[in-house]
Image: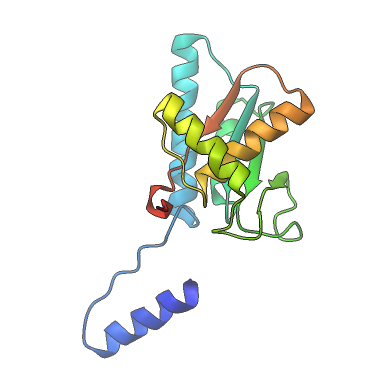
Amino acid sequence: ISKAMNDAMERFTRQKCKPFYVTGGGHDLPGGIAFIDAVKELYQYGVVNNYKPDYIFHASGTGSTQAGIMVGLDLVGWSDVKVVGISVARQEERGKQIIADYLYGGYECYTHEMKDYLQKVMLHTGLIFDMTYSGKGFYGMMDVIKHHGLEGNILFWHTGGLMNMQK
């Protein structure tokens, strides 16, 4: 993706256009800072509602979401909250730090079992999940909870992925 984006930037610049590069997802400093701020909002919600998560699960691509969440948790004094990133794109070697792998073959790959499960969840809850990013994260979280018997306040941080919806 980055090569295609860089090629497009060069092409438009040669054509005397003034392209502006908007990075995908949150894999840059502003993206990480946005999650730090979001954790601060979660903390304020927790103070008002007497809530604190024991676990935060999220879909993980580049790791910036997880980095922002972890820095935010440290800043608000919740460094004991366990953060679990479900890797949706990286092999284990590249995403080893606390990231569980539910790749199913790669970034846009999924199993029919996962698709069927997520369709049932969407019909039951009204929450929308794609098969590329947030859906893999949610499915992975449910699998980890089931197989490891996790209990307590478990939060799934839905980071979007609606642009990856498939027919």
- In the picture, measured across the screen, residue 99 lies left or right of residue 49, that is right
- In the picture, measured across the screen, residue 118 lies left or right of residue 4, that is right
- Please tell me which residue lies in front, 12 or 164: 164
- Residue 50 in the image, given as x and y percentages of width and height: 52, 9
- Please tell me which residue lies in front, 110 or 156: 110
- Please tell me which residue lies in front, 165 or 43: 165
- Residue 22 in the image, given as x and y percentages of width and height: 35, 63
The residue located at (48%, 71%) in the rendering is 1
In the rendered image, the vertical position of residue 1 relative to residue 64, given as above or below:
below
- Residue 47 in the image, given as x and y percentages of width and height: 48, 14
The residue located at (48%, 78%) in the rendering is 3
Q: How is the image coloured?
A: rainbow
In the rendered image, the vertical position of residue 162 relative to residue 43, given as above or below:
below
The residue located at (55%, 51%) in the rendering is 64
- In the picture, measured across the screen, residue 115 lies left or right of residue 87, that is left
The residue located at (45%, 54%) in the rendering is 25
Q: Is residue 68 visible?
A: no
Total numbered badges shown on the rendered structure = 0
Which quadrant of the structure image shows residue 11?
Answer: bottom left
Q: Is residue 112 visible?
A: yes
